[in-house]
């Protein structure tokens, strides 16, 4: 069965750097926020430091991946995510038969939210850190914003994990972000416009699959 490269090593590295850091910050953030969990762990200072350094490591790792990785692939991904067409809108409104590119409408919205939330987390987190040292940086709503982002992100994460790990129709997508490639038949069913595009290539070392008519 033919396979098609879906994500380069750089794209996968960027995803997993973000995922690992997010889980670290989410767990430590919950430990700081929930009294019962904070009491059970009991080491607030260590948890707080871990939360802070996870954020710093996250930002540094993202920069490193962008600098040393395949920036051409990242630019291509950014362009594809930015290209929102009528088929994407039809997908989001639940209309069947809307062919999708490498990213469907839902994935594009998720990417936009991920970037927006990351920026808001970073800004509010820096303000909270500065506010502990200088009262001029203490603003009403900063704590609320940071906490609200956490809870909304948790809901989005649950939905993301359901589609990536549990849902039988969509969980094969996980192979793309772990192995780099997906089955051609699955890609054709879920991302027909991407499969038919001339830029689609098989993963390194895999023969180009024969394509059947749509």
Image (cartoon, rainbow, N blue to C red):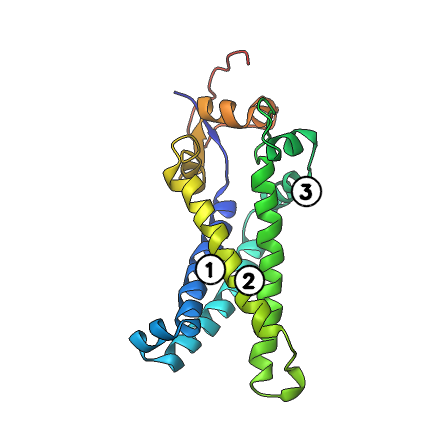
Residue found at the far bottom of this picture: 134
Residue closer to the observer: 49 or 8: 49
Task: Kindly report the distance in space between the C-alpha atoms of the residues bearing marks 2 and 3.
Answer: 23 Å
- The reply, left or right, for residue 186 in relation to residue 104 is left
Residue closer to the observer: 194 or 160: 160
Task: Kindly report the distance in space between the C-alpha atoms of the residues bearing marks 1 and 3.
Answer: 23 Å
Identify the residue shown where x is 59% and y is 81%.
130
Q: Quadrant of the C terminus?
A: top right
Could one spot residue 135 in this view of the protein?
A: yes
| Mark 3 crowdedness (10 Å alpha carbons): few <14, some 14-19, many ≥20 | few
Q: Position of residue 29 (x, y in %)?
A: 44, 69
Are circles 1 and 2 on residues that touch, CB within 8 Å? Answer: no
Identify the residue shown where x is 47% and y is 56%.
154
Q: Is 55 drawn above or below residue 188 in the view shown?
A: below
Of badges 1 and 2, nearer the viewer stands 2
| Mark 2 crowdedness (10 Å alpha carbons): few <14, some 14-19, many ≥20 | some
Q: Is 63 drawn above or below residue 4 in the view shown?
A: below
Q: Secondary structure at mark 3?
A: helix
State the image quarter where residue 23 is shown: bottom left
Q: Earlier in the sequence, mark 1 or mark 2?
A: 1
| Disc ID at residue 22 | 1
Could one spot residue 178 in this view of the protein?
A: no
Q: Quadrant of the N terminus?
A: top left
State the image quarter where residue 128 is shown: bottom right
| Mark 1 crowdedness (10 Å alpha carbons): few <14, some 14-19, many ≥20 | some
Q: Position of residue 161 (x, y in %)?
A: 42, 46
Q: Is 64 drawn above or below residue 126 in the view shown?
A: above
Q: Secondary structure at mark 2?
A: helix
Judging by the rendered image, the residue that carries numbered circle 2 is 149
Residue found at the far left of this picture: 40
Judging by the rendered image, the residue that carries numbered circle 3 is 82
Numbered label tally: 3
């Amino acid at each position: 069965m033919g396979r098609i490269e879906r994500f380069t090593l750089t794209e996968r590295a960027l995803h997993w750097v973000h995922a690992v850091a997010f889980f670290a910050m989410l767990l430590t953030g919950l430990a700081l926020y929930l009294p019962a969990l904070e009491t059970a762990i009991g080491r607030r200072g260590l948890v707080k430091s871990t939360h802070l350094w996870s954020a710093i490591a996250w930002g540094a790792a993202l920069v490193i991946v962008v600098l040393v990785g395949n920036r051409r692939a990242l630019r291509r991904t950014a362009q594809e995510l930015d290209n929102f067409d009528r088929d994407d809108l039809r997908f989001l409104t639940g209309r069947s038969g809307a062919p999708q590119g490498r990213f469907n409408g839902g994935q594009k919205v998720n990417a936009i939210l991920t970037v927006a939330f990351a920026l808001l987390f970073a800004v509010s987190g820096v303000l909270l850190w500065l506010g502990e040292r200088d009262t001029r940086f203490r603003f009403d709503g900063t704590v609320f914003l940071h906490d609200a982002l956490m809870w909304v992100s948790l809901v989005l994460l649950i939905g993301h994990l359901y589609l990536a790990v549990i849902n039988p129709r969509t969980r094969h997508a996980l192979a793309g972000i772990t192995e780099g490639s997906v089955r051609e038949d699955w890609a054709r069913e879920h991302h027909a416009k991407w499969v038919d595009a001339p830029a689609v290539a098989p993963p390194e070392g895999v023969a180009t699959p024969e394509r059947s008519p749509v």
